[in-house]
Amino acid sequence: MCRSIKTLRPPVTEEAGPEDFHAAALQYVRKISGFRAPSARNKAAFDAAVDAVEEATRRLLDEIEVRPAPSRAADAQARQPA
């Protein structure tokens, strides 16, 4: 019913955008609701949930701070005995 939701934060995914946020939100709401597509009576609630999760995803990714990954050369130097 729902494929895995991928990591959207840098540096894992450098160019995640609104389409990625919407797709992840849709996957999440489908998974927790158990509906691939809601009935007409549930469509408004389903769509509102997707919008809310999409906005929360965007806000989270805008606000978190990610430490840059160390370069391989610096990492190798740090592991060598002095």
Image: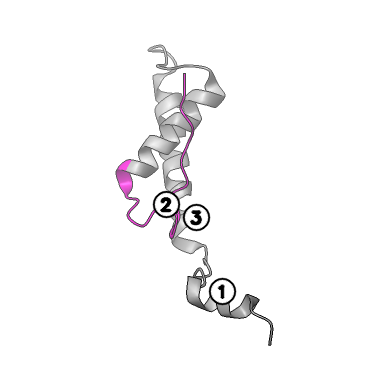
In the depicted structure, whether residue 64 falls above or below residue 5: below
Please report contact status of discs 3 and 1: CB closer than 8 Å, yes or no. no
Q: Which residue sits at x=43%, y=37%?
A: 24
Q: Nearer the viewer, residue 49 or 37?
A: 37
In the depicted structure, whether residue 34 falls above or below residue 14: above
Tell me where residue 27 sits by quadrant: top left
Q: Position of residue 12 (x, y in %)?
A: 44, 54
Magenta-colored span: 1-19
**Mark 3 surroundings within 10 Å by alpha-carbon count, few (fewer than 14), some (14 through 19), many (20 or more):** few
Locate residue 71 relative to residue 22 in the image: left or right.
right
Measure the C-alpha gap from mark 1 to mark 2.
Answer: 32 Å
Which circle's residue, 3 or 1, is located before the other in the chain?
3
The residue type indicated by label 1 comes to Asp
Look at the image and tell me whether residue 71 can be seen: no
Determine which residue is flagged by label 2.
Answer: 58
Q: Position of residue 75 (x, y in %)?
A: 56, 74
Determine which residue is flagged by label 3.
Answer: 60
Label 2 SS: helix
Measure the C-alpha gap from mark 3 to mark 2.
Answer: 5 Å
**Mark 2 surroundings within 10 Å by alpha-carbon count, few (fewer than 14), some (14 through 19), many (20 or more):** some
Which circle's residue, 1 or 2, is located before the other in the chain?
2
Q: Nearer the viewer, residue 7 or 23?
A: 7
Please report contact status of discs 1 and 2: CB closer than 8 Å, yes or no. no
Decide whether residue 6 is among the magenta residues.
Answer: yes
Locate residue 61 relative to residue 80 in the image: left or right.
left
Q: Which mark is residue 32?
A: none
In which quadrant is the C terminus drawn?
Answer: bottom right
Q: Main secondary structure of the magenta part?
A: loop
Q: Position of residue 5 (x, y in %)?
A: 47, 36
Label 1 SS: helix
Determine which residue is flagged by label 1.
Answer: 75
